[in-house]
Image (cartoon, helix red, strand yellow):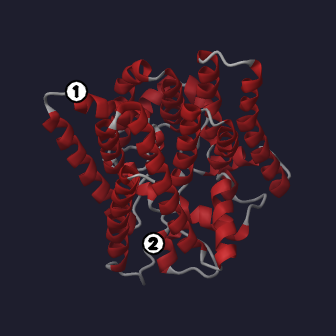
Amino acid sequence: MCKNDLRLLGLLIGCKLAVALFFIGGVVCLNLNSSEGFSFGLQWPEFNAWTVRLSPWDAGYYLQISKYGYNDKSSLCAFYPLWPGLIYAFSNLFHCKQVIVGLLLSNILSIVGLWLFGKLILEEYGQKVSRYSLCFLLAFPGAFFFCIPYTESLFFLLVMLVFHALHKEQWSVLVVATFLLPLTRAVGIFVLVPLGWFLWEQRKSIRYWLVLLAPLSGYATYFGIMYFYTGNALFGFEAQKAFPHSPSIGNIIDPVGFWNSFINIHSIFGMRDALLDRLFFLLLLILLPFVWKLNRTWFFYTLLLGVVPALTNWFMSYRRYVMVCFPIFVVLALLLQKSSHKGVYWYYIALLVLLQIVTIIFAANYRWIG
């Protein structure tokens, strides 16, 4: 490992520790005996306030799955199995509580994913762009989800393994990563499109196209797991209806509903009416043409991973969905490098950091964070 790699790892670990200490410090300073806001949290027999505070919102669902698995009457089936499966495996291997394992795994996996991201951009565009890209990504409010037991860390790591493997043409790594993506989040299956574009653009022979079977096999495995636990391979989709603004393909062909949702702005950080989610969606749309010029494979990835969740979910949790659209941070870095008004970009980064601090404070108070 070269000096630049060690410096990058040191920077990432330092940023991680700062965010983690700020979050845990906020939790410690709260009245943990209060049950206010816990009704949406964990429903374990061994319920305690610490577990809830350190695993807010969806993180609590993943920890419950890792403890008890799925059943055919539970809304837990709306969540994908790979992340809680990892927590279950490591908590049993090391005899640790799920919440501790979830926190450690989330931070370790995201450090590796961010390191791969920095290396990929360094090899493609140089050290300065790599550093700027990491600054934009780490400052982004959704980056806090890399620190708590959500799927973002695992999903981002798998995405970076995919694009790093494409860059190096490491086909075995590519097969494993693309197989696991649909087991992590529903949008993981969309890797088929950028992968297919890469194969076509590079004029690969037909035997390379067999790699497309990996994500399809991963998705089939997901349906198999649902069938094993519930007797219904599609029960995961039915379980999603228990949640507000559950994702629906039908929403894509409802432009009136989408527009009404887009203009439904009554808060900055809210669950379904947040200004932030709409602004980040507009930012992605503005930057998409630049991503097209930069890398067509990246463009199709960003288009699907950035636009489809907004259309199907009507902006709920959008700030963390858009975070894994790494090419937009590269574009911002390239624009910063070329700009004669660099101060504007650093003001933008400062604003993002401020928003992330507010996100951490909200998380420590068990308020909605995305």
Q: Would residue 281 be seen by someone viewing this image from the given angle?
A: no
Q: Amino acid at mark 2?
A: Arg
* Neighbours of disc 1 within 10 Å: few (<14), some (14-19), many (20+): few
- For marks 2 and 1 on the same chain, the one whose residue lies earlier in the sequence: 2
Q: How far apart are the two marked residues, 2 and 1, measured between alpha carbons? A: 43 Å
The residue under the point 36% across, 45% down is 137
The residue at the point 48 percent across, 46 percent down is: 116
**Amino acid type of disc 1?**
Lys
Residue 207, image quadrant: top right
Residue under numbered circle 2: 53
Q: Residue at x 41, y 81 (%)?
A: 32
Horizontal and vertical percent position of residue 285: 39, 26
Query: Which residue in the structure is indicated by mark 1?
Result: 338
Compared across the picture, whether 169 is left or right of 307 comes to right
Q: Position of residue 88 (x, y in %)?
A: 68, 68
Local SS, label 2: helix
